[in-house]
Image: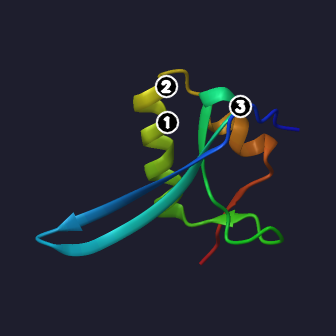
């Protein structure tokens, strides 16, 4: 179980020449120890591969601790198979 002391939603929007490329929402969990992409729904815990990679990169750059995989697995999230 993930201990959630502080939960925060963050929205990243990527533009290229004023064209929306990707909108990513992720959560900051366990007092800021990790960032995780939002799953598709409460029943479908899969996440898009692009969102997985971008949030993993953001987590590594910001926290520097490398807790992403640990919390991703604890939350039972899965990469969507397209």
Residue 40: give x, y in percent of width and height: 67, 71
Instruction: Indicate the secondary structure of the residue bearing disc 1.
Output: helix
Which mark is on residue 27?
none
Q: Would residue 11 be found to the left or right of residue 43 on screen?
A: left
Q: How is the image coloured?
A: rainbow
Q: Is residue 74 above or below residue 12?
A: above
Residue under the point 43% across and 41% down = 57
Of residues 65 and 9, the one nearer the viewer is 9
The picture places residue 29, in percent across and down from the top left corner, at 67, 38
**Mark 3 crowd level (few <14, some 14–19, many ≥20, 10 Å Cα):** some
Q: Residue at x 71, y 34 (%)?
A: 70
Residue 81 vs residue 54: left or right?
right
Q: How far is the residue under mark 3 from the one under mark 1?
A: 13 Å
**Which residue is labeled 2 in the image?**
63
Q: Position of residue 18 (x, y in %)?
A: 15, 72
Label 3 close to label 2 by CB (< 8 Å): no
Which residue is under mark 3? 30
Q: Secondary structure at mark 2?
A: helix
Q: Which residue is mark 1?
A: 59
Q: CA distance from mark 3 to mark 2?
A: 12 Å
Of circles 3 and 1, which is in front? 3
Task: State the CA–CA distance, disc 2 to disc 1.
Answer: 6 Å
Q: Is residue 61 above or below residue 23?
A: above
Horizontal and vertical percent for residue 10? 49, 51
């Amino acid at each position: 179980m993930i201990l959630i002391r502080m939960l925060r939603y963050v929205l990243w929007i990527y533009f290229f020449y004023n064209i929306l490329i990707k909108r990513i929402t992720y959560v900051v969990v366990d007092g800021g120890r990790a960032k995780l992409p939002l799953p598709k729904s409460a029943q479908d815990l899969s996440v898009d591969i692009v969102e997985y990679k971008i949030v993993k990169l953001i987590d590594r750059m910001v926290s520097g601790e490398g807790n992403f995989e640990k919390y991703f697995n604890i939350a039972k999230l899965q990469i969507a198979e397209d």
